[in-house]
Structures are given as structure tokens and as C-alpha cells.
Amino acid sequence: MRRLGVSPGTVMIAAFQALVRPNPSAPSLLDNPLVLWGLVLVGIGGIYGQAAILGVVRDLRLPDTDDAMRLVQVRDLLAGQGWFDLAQHRLPPEGASMHWSRLVDLPIAALILLLQPLAGAKAEAVAAALWPALAFALYAAILHRSVRDLFGRRAALLALFAATQTMLIGALFAPGRVDHHNLQICAVLGVALCLMQPQPGRREGLAAGALSALSLAIGLESLPFIVAAGLFAAGAWIVSGEPARRLFAGFALALGGVAPALFAVQTAPAAWGATACDALSPPWLWLCAAAGLTGAAASLLGDRLSQAASRLALAAGGGAVALAGFWLIAPSCLAGPFPDMPEAVRRGWLEQVREMQPFWALLREQPAVVMGTYLPTVAAAVAALALAVAGGAERRRAWGLAGGFLCVGLAVALLQFRGLYVTTAFVPLVAGPLLDRAVALLREPAATTRTRLLALLAGLATFGKIWLVLAAVALPADRNGASDDLAAWSACTGQPAMLRLAALAPGTVLAPIDLGPSLLLNTPHRVVAAPYHRNGVGIAAGLAAFGDEESLRGVAASRAADYIVLCQGAEIPGGDASVVGRLLDGRFAPSWLEPVPMETMLPKPIDLRVWRVRPDR
């Protein structure tokens, strides 16, 4: 480009300026709503395919261990466990308290009850397949409304199609995804929709604050986005004064009022004073209350805060009081949500969980995942911020907010992959208008080929599935071991294996940590460990057990284990020479362990290996 006398920056700016020109009036195939809806339905079919749905309905095969833990919690609630009793009692010795919200359990439980007259014993499995689709319908409705109001109907439908091509949207709304992330995505996108309105007022502020409180009650993963929304509302009031006062006051008052109400709804009164760094509790409620008090002061003082300096002083004072109070109430929470986690558990388990890994670790170990998730998010963020600068004033607010939320999420995702979970909600919001403008430019006579191409590439760069295809072409093929390991775990957690294990006399199972949720979901057994951070004692025991022969027997005795369960064919920590490897291939056969045949009444051998512990040997 330099040889042509045009810099790459000039071309990009020209392309972005072209994207915000008025749409041409010439019709095209994509102006037909039926064609666009057909495109959307094809994309939805890629998420909700027959195989994925049948895997959940027929075999209760869930995508993630957290989904299994969630369904266990819902099942316990329906079986009579108290609303405020959030412990998982089959994690000995005393059970493990759960911090997951009953606000997520409630609609899933209601759906199961609603389906029971129709689906009978399959109601739970049908609900697990149906719930994510209902959550996706809610997300799609919010997304469509957001884009349609700002950019038009074609852009809105293209945004829906882009959502089906976004990897994490497809993953977090897939059949069986009954965990809470999809609801958080809907809540935070709803907050953004309220703030993006051309002239948001008290009504939009109240809605945004209430949705922010709901997202925090569901889980604190959305906290960075709620902070960003609050800073935007406060900043708009500081700069603009009276025109933005109603928005800021409404947001702050709703956040400060609704968060305590939701906390009280799902928390036992006896625990109202207990601090929890990983869930909505007094320190986080104090931040919400401080925001509410600041909003109330802004509303009451009104015209007396006519100068930006006085508004800044009030907002800064409210922020300082909020932070000081947080530090006094729960200084340990400044270290993060897991301040009491043993270091051995942090290193041996938490840091190995993919959603907790930083960008650079994933780039080294799973570059295709990085290309399919991080790169489209970066592309959307760059496009949104560039359009906020180069676009018209009427849409600058929307583009700036979208770009801001995307940047917040990317900053979190540099440290933890799960920062992309909520962030991914905004990628289709940017992709739809980009594709809409690219389609329009294809029929605009004045547009150059280069401008059309850059506009089209800008839109397609937000498609995670396109990056995934490029990764498959550009990167070396994955080692077979990874796919073999996944297939082995799938077989071990499948219903044929689990039903055979469930037929054994109920007892306590010592197994690899990731097997815990499937054992809880599909069998009556207790488990020593499950991948849940408040089960730190169990996780520590699970990590220690499979270190050597002495540790295995010691943990089995101390945890009163009745069975030891392993997965044949899965990756073996420590390799074939470890106690796990020698148990699986028969080189280690102590007299205190009795192999339990698992092939009885099954059509083919299974990968789950079971030993009964003989305490008298």
C-alpha cells in the first residue's frame, strides 16, 4: 500500500467512514426478511442439531461439569432440600456449601415440573435440553431489539445470524448448558440496551440498575461490566449534568435497592451477616448501597449541582466511601474471590481449569481456541471504537458503549478466559451493523472495490467460526491424544457406565475430581471430590490420593471410601508409571482393592474401571 502512496491507516479510516454513510435504497436479496430469517434458522440449526439434543434427552449428556452440578442442585431442590439450604450433602464429611444462585435454579425447576405431565421420567432431561434454547430466545430478543432500534431491521437479523457464528454464544447456549452464564449474558446485554438509547432517562436507568443487581445476584463474574456501566452513567451525569441526572440516579437507586432484595430472597436470614468473597454478600451489598446513596444525593440536590466540578466531587466522594467501606468490611476480598483456597488446591486444580487460564497459557496450549474466541472479540472492539470516532453523533453513544464493554471483557480475559463469557454477548451487536453496511456497499456504485472488501472483511472478522476454520488450515493438526482423552471421558460419564455404577450399593467414591459431578448426577453415591472451589478439602484429598500407593490407601481410609473409580483411556496424571497407570493396566493390584466387573448386562466393554475398597485387608 505504501508503494501506491496510501497508508494502511488511511484505507481503514476510509472504510470506517464508508460504513456509516446512509444505506442505499437499491434492493438486494438480503433485503428480503424471509431470506434473512432463513439464514438465521440455518445458524440456529448449527447450535441445536438433532445429535446435540438427543445426547441430552436420551443420555442426559451435559456439556460441562458445572452443568451437571447445577442440575444436581435443582434436583435436590425438587426433592425437598430447603430453599436456603445450598449445601451439596453428598460431598463428605459435612457437605460443601454452594454459592450458586437459587434464582437460576427456580426457572429450571419450574420447567421440569411443567414438563412432567408430558415427559414423565424424561422431564429433567427434556428441560436440560430446552432451557438453553429458551435462554437463547431471550438473548436473541434483546439483541434484535438493540440493533433494530439503532441500525434497522436488516442489521438486526444479520446480528442474529452473527450470534449463531460466535463460538462462545454457541457453546454457552448449547443443549444441556443449564449453568448460569447464559442468563448473565442476557442481563448484561439488557443493561447495555438501556444505556444505548439515544436519550435514556429515569426509566432506562431503573431498568439498567435492576438488571445489574440481577446479574450480580446470579454471579459476580459480571461485576466488571456492572462497574463499567455505573462509571458510564456517572460520567455522563458529570459531563452533561441535568440531561443525564435521571439516568444516573435511576441506575444507582435501582442497584442499591434491588441487590439487597435479591440477596434476601435467596439467602437465609441467619447468613445475612456472613461475608462471601465469591457471591453477593455484605461487602458487595455495601458497594451497591453506596451507589444508591450517591444516586439519591444526586437526585435530591438536583439543580444545586450545576457545575461539573461539584458533580465530580459528589461522585468521587461516593466512590471513596464505597471503597473505604468495602476495605473495612472485607479486606480479604481485595485478593479475589478465593482468598481462603489452599495453595495446593490453587496450583493443582484451579490453575488447570481452562476458564481460569490466562491468554498466554491458552495461546501456547490451545491456539485454535484463542483464534476462535479472542480474535473476533478484538475485531469487534476495534470496529466499535473506530466507528465511535468516525461515525455520526447519533450512534456514537452506542458504538462507544459496545467498544467499552468489549475492552473491559478483553482486559479481564487476558487474565482469565472466562472474562470472554459475558463479553461475547457484544460481538454480534457489532457484527450485525458491520455486515449490514458491507451488504449495502456491494450495491452502492460510488463505493470502490477496496472499500467494499474491507467492509466485508470487517464484518466477517467477528465470526468465530471463520477464525476456527482458518485455525484448522493454518495450525498443525491436534495430537490424537487430546481427542482420545475427550472420547474416553465421554464414555466414562455416559449413562451406560453410570447406570452400572449406580447399581452398586450406595457408598463413597474416590475418583478423579472431574468425574465427581457425573457421579452425583447419575448415581446415589457420595463423592470425595468435585470441581467446585468451596469443596477445597475434597479437592485436596482428590489431588493427594493419586500421587502414590501410600497416599491412595491413606486418602481412601481417611475419607471412608467404599469405591475407587478411574477412567480407562483418559489422560493419566504422572503417566503410565503413576499409581493410576499401574492400577489401570494391572501392574498394581493390592489385596485391599477388589476389582468390580463393569461389563455385566452391557452390550460392549466400557471405559469406567471400579474397585471396591476392603477395609479389613
Image (tube, rainbow, N blue to C red):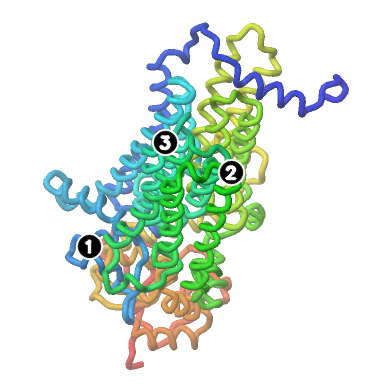
Q: Quadrant of the C terminus?
A: bottom left
How many marks are shown on the rendered structure? 3
Which residue carries the number 3 mark? 201
Q: Amino acid at mark 1?
A: Leu
Q: What numbered label is drawn on residue 77?
A: 1
User: Element under label 1?
Assistant: helix
Q: Earlier in the sequence, mark 2 or mark 3?
A: 3
Q: Position of residue 415 (x, y in %)?
A: 60, 57
Q: Badge 2 local density, few (<14 within 10 Å), some, or many (20+)? A: some
**Residue 171 visible in rendering:** no
Decide: marks 3, 1 in contact (CB < 8 A)?
no
Q: Amino acid at mark 2?
A: Ala
In the image: residue 166, left or right of residue 257: right
User: Element under label 3?
Assistant: loop
Q: Badge 3 local density, few (<14 within 10 Å), some, or many (20+)? A: many
Residue ID at (37%, 49%): 254
Tell me if residue 175 comes above or below residue 416 in the rendering.
above
Q: Which mark is in front, 1 or 2?
A: 2
Q: Quadrant of the N terminus?
A: top right
Residue ID at (39%, 59%): 66
Q: What numbered label is drawn on residue 187?
A: none
Q: Position of residue 175 (x, y in %)?
A: 35, 45
Q: Amino acid at mark 3?
A: Gly
Q: Position of residue 86 (x, y in %)?
A: 29, 68
Tell me if residue 21 comes above or below residue 267 in the rendering.
above
